[in-house]
Image (spheres, helix red, strand yellow):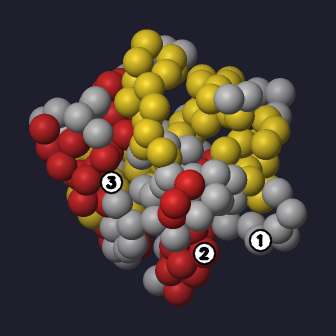
Amino acid sequence: MKIGVLAMQGAYAEHISILKSLEVYTVEIRNKEDLKEIDGLIIPGGESTTMGKLIRALDIYEDLKEKIESGLPVWGTCAGMILLAKSIYEDDTKHLATMDIEVRRNAYGRQLGSFGTKSFVKGIGEDVEMIFIRAPYIESVGKKVEVLSVIDGNIVAAKENNMLVTSFHPELTEDNRVHKYFVNLVKNNIK
């Protein structure tokens, strides 16, 4: 099994570190060649507008979108969630637009609005550690989207087929359960 981490900007090194601690073969995705023969993909937190421009400038947008639409397991954290969303609240910008969710960017305000908490995530368990940094949340979901976690009435984790999204940053905590959950999604997809 080989999981790629989009490594253009944002918290990709932290994801790679956790995957390696779980003994998962990991590759940094920086160009088209890197996309070959991966079994799963993580799109990390960072700056969604910058990442959206980079995947187009580096000519991997079409390949990435096609792989996800063909069933490649993908997990978007924070900015990654924005890239996967079909729509962004009060914004016409479209990135990969593969998951039937509408997200609200910077929903928790600026950097000073960042916070941490622990909560339940369906399929993972209680007291999952969550770090929110200028985080988005999900405004609405399509019929096939499964809501996995809600904080203060806002959807912060969801799944649709091969796509997983979290508003929060599990890679910035000692809790590796969300990574294990994604690794299992990838394993189950390989069978």
Tell me where residue 7 appears, x and y as whole percent. Answer: 34, 67
Residue underneath mark 1: 93
Q: In which quarter of the view is residue 188 placed?
A: top left
Which residue is pictured at 64% across the width and 59% down the height? 109
Asked whether, in this view, residue 57 is left or right of residue 173, the answer is right
- The outermost residue toward the bottom is 57
Residue 178 drawn above or below residue 17: above
Residue underneath mark 2: 49
Q: Distance between the residues labelled 2 and 3?
A: 20 Å
Residue 64 drawn above or below residue 165: below
Query: What is the quadrant of the C terminus in the image?
Result: top left
Disc 2 is placed on an element classified as helix
The mark lying in front, picked from 3 and 1, is: 1
Q: Which of 88 and 22 is in front in this view?
A: 88
Neighbour class for label 1 at 10 Å: few (<14), some, many (≥20)? some
Residue 15 drawn above or below residue 111: above
Residue 106, labelled with which disc? none
Disc 3 is placed on an element classified as strand
Q: Can residue 80 be seen in this view?
A: no
Q: Earlier in the sequence, mark 2 or mark 3?
A: 3
Contact flag, marks 2 and 1 (Cβ < 8 Å) = yes
